Image: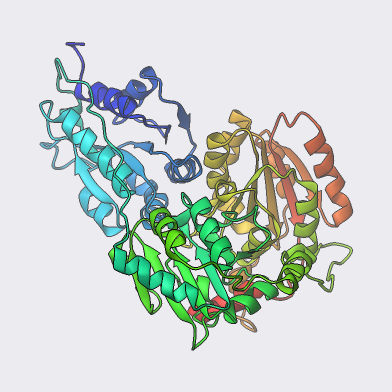
Amino acid sequence: MNDQSVAEVVGRTLAELGLAHVYGLVGSGNFAVTNALRDAGVGFTAARHEGGAATMADAHARTADAVTALSLHQGCGLTNAMTGITEAAKSRTPLIVLAAEPAGAAVRSNFRVDQDGLARAVGAVPERVHSAATAVADTVRAFRTARQQRRTVVLNLPLDVQAQPCPDAPPAPAVPSLAPSRPDVASVASLAAVLAGAHRPVFVGGRGARHAGPEVAALAERCGALLATSAVAHGLFADSPWSLGICGGFATPLAAELVADADVVVAWGASLTMWTTRHGALIGPGTTVVQVDDDPAALGANHPVDLGVCADVAEAARDTAAAVTASPGYRSPKIAARIEAEGRWPQVPVDDTSTTARVDPRVLSARLDALLPAERTVTTDSGNFMGYPAAFLAVPDAAGFCFTQAFQSVGLGLSTAIGASLARPDRLTVAALGDGGFLMGVAELETAARLGPPLLVVVYDDAAYGAEVHHFAGADHATVTFPDRDLAAVGRGFGCDGLVVRSVDDLDGVRAWLDGPRERPLVVDAKVVADEPSWWLAEAFRGH
């Protein structure tokens, strides 16, 4: 133990603290710390690009609800990963970025950039290991911030400090979980009074309620509330017959109708963005809006609220259930029958626009939903297509949907799927991508083929950046349209299985793959019609 370096102590300390997994691309600057993590028993996944590694780590942390790490070379390794780090920071993912840094004296190093400034610019927390004497304390501080505050932390590791001997470094002290904050008595009484007077209450669960599904559902049962989620919490109430699914742009016509007609809307750990509220259109002028969140800065930040409750969501729901008067609320036999008959997108009739060469993406998605096993993880990239898999593909619970779209970046979907699949290898993972995002992140197909997770890659291929085509209707689209390519052949070139789909009958190939050993990921190049923007995109453009 006496001949340890600081890099080795940092790796050992993170392992002792319970780091779930580490992703990265290894260069000279992060070689020692990565191997120290591996030697201490932390699993490591090598990606083909730092940007892919960042999103894999982000998705793993979200799916497993655990602190993960990203290991990077100094300078360019960090800059290559910045889009993924930005997404993680905006989503409050508990992630530690182990970023090597040029030695303090190497002021003219080609790798020298302001790594602290980069972290701050995208909303991450910059930290640093300062010396051998402080190595354990600095590492524990970074881990504590990531776990207790759910923040993305960039832990800079200067090369000269990494190499310092660190004799007799102490073991890592325990990082306790913080006790959840209880709501004050007055807030509970106010919320109970609002719910007691509600005839049509709707609860919207967000990311901050993913740990509190049973408590929120129990309160909804007591006061007769219907249940919905923001996109990132899709699946939270999947086992309830009173679930409306996603609220907002991806909402079914029935969900939009019932939410808009609510007299009380309670947001549980949901920030009520323009996406969740359809630019406010789903909140009626006479609707009482309540927001429950453990971050006081979140209350009313995106939409005005009549009552803000600053507390842990589970604690607030539990205390309010004990105080509220039981009521049937919005739950009636008529509403139950409508939810059963109209509550999911595959139940909504569509005019099939499929041709002999291309398939309607709604019909494709509905058929996929029927084919896939119930135990699944769905991930989606960004683009015109994204509403189809997000809305049509059911998920078993909140861990079954990983939505890396806080930064709205195209190209993160494949890496999201790889990270989620390694966090939940017991489930089939579905990566739903557009052709643009697929080709942006295509290097990670090698990672998928090398690792061999149960992964289905479905490319909604319209040979274009469809959002731009539809956003700039009537304009010259030469800059955003491309020749049609055989993306299934691209998948086979990386070592995956490949299938071109031009009709729902071609999905028999997916069925055969599902029934088989699934030894390799399957890339489905689904040639989809793209004559008009998806329903959600037309709404989303109002925010541009």
Measuring 36% from the left and 43% from the top, which residue is drawn there? 95
Q: Nearer the viewer, residue 337 or 297?
A: 337
323 horizontally vs 131: left or right: right
Q: How many marks?
A: 0
523 left or right of 299 in image: right
Q: Quadrant of residue 417?
A: top right
Confirm whether residue 410 shows in the render.
Answer: no
The reply to whether residue 118 is visible in this rendering is yes
Left or right of residue 289: residue 111: left
The N terminus lies in quadrant: top left
Task: Return the x and y of residue 433 as percentages of the image width and height.
Answer: 63, 54
Vertical comparison of 10 with 186: above or below: above
- The residue sitting at 60% across, 49% down in the picture is 397
Between 58 and 82, the residue placed more toward the observer is: 58
The x and y percentages for residue 196 are 48, 74
User: Where's residue 112, x and y in %?
Assistant: 21, 44
Q: Residue at 54% of width from left, 83% of height from top?
A: 281
